[in-house]
Image (spheres, rainbow, N blue to C red):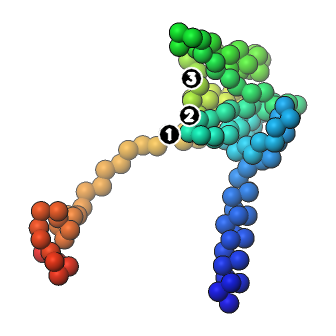
Amino acid sequence: MKRLFLLLLIFIFNSSILFGQERIIFNGQTLNLQLEVEGNLDLLSLKKDNSYRFFVRDSNNTLHELVNTKDDDNTYFNEFRDVLADLTKDANMSTDEVGFGRYSLKKFIKAYNLKGHLRYAYTDDKVKTQVRLGIFGGITNHPFIDNPNNTKV
């Protein structure tokens, strides 16, 4: 019975991971890309070794990689802005303020999808900071009080 439960648990865990990713072949590489934004332009990302690779899929199902290479003196070339400008030339959107980060790219592509498609619902994913105050928070486990019997203070 324990083996059956363990196998069922492993199956559920593995199947839930596969739902959020798309397996795409790009330049001979098989990539498991995660869909970040869906619309006229789709933003797909691949997290690898604490860094991201970003891809944009247009309405013709063509995949474009967004790259940002840097020179020997640490100046970035910002090639991704040229790709985004070419893909969004019909909307007259400026790519000067777009950064090569996940949040900035998501915001730009969502703004383009909002202008290009009337049924697209733009929601801002930026997390707002909240503060919650508790009256008795941390009194029973204060670090300066000896409590060898694990009783309440």
Q: Secondary structure at mark 3?
A: loop
Tag of residue 126: 1
Q: Is residue 98 above or below residue 129?
A: above
Mark 1 → mark 3, Cα distance in angstroms: 15 Å
- Going by the picture, which residue comes out furthest to the right? 60
97 sits to left or right of 36: left
Q: Residues within 10 Å of mark 3 (few under 14, many from 20)?
A: some
Q: In the image, is residue 108 above or below residue 73? A: below
Give the mark nearest the N terminus, 2 or 1.
2
Residue at image position (56%, 17%) is 97
Rendered view: 102 above or below 83? below
Q: For residue 103, which numbered disc appears in the image?
A: 2
Which amino acid lies under the numbered mark 2 shown in the image of this protein? Tyr
Front position in the image: 82 or 32: 32
Count residues near mark 1 (Cα–Cα under 10 Å), then give few for <14, some for 14-19, many for 20+: few
Q: Secondary structure at mark 2?
A: helix
Pointer 2 with pointer 1, Cβ within 8 A: yes
Query: Furthest-bottom residue in view?
Result: 1
Q: Residues within 10 Å of mark 2 (few under 14, many from 20)?
A: few
Q: Alpha carbon of mark 2 to alpha carbon of mark 1: how far?
A: 8 Å
- Across and down, in percent, residue 70 comes to 60, 15
Where residue 24 sits in the image (x, y, percent)?
82, 42
Q: Is residue 93 visible?
A: no
Q: Nearer the viewer, mark 1 or mark 3?
A: 3
Q: Which residue is mark 3?
A: 99
* Quarter of the figure that contains the C terminus: bottom left
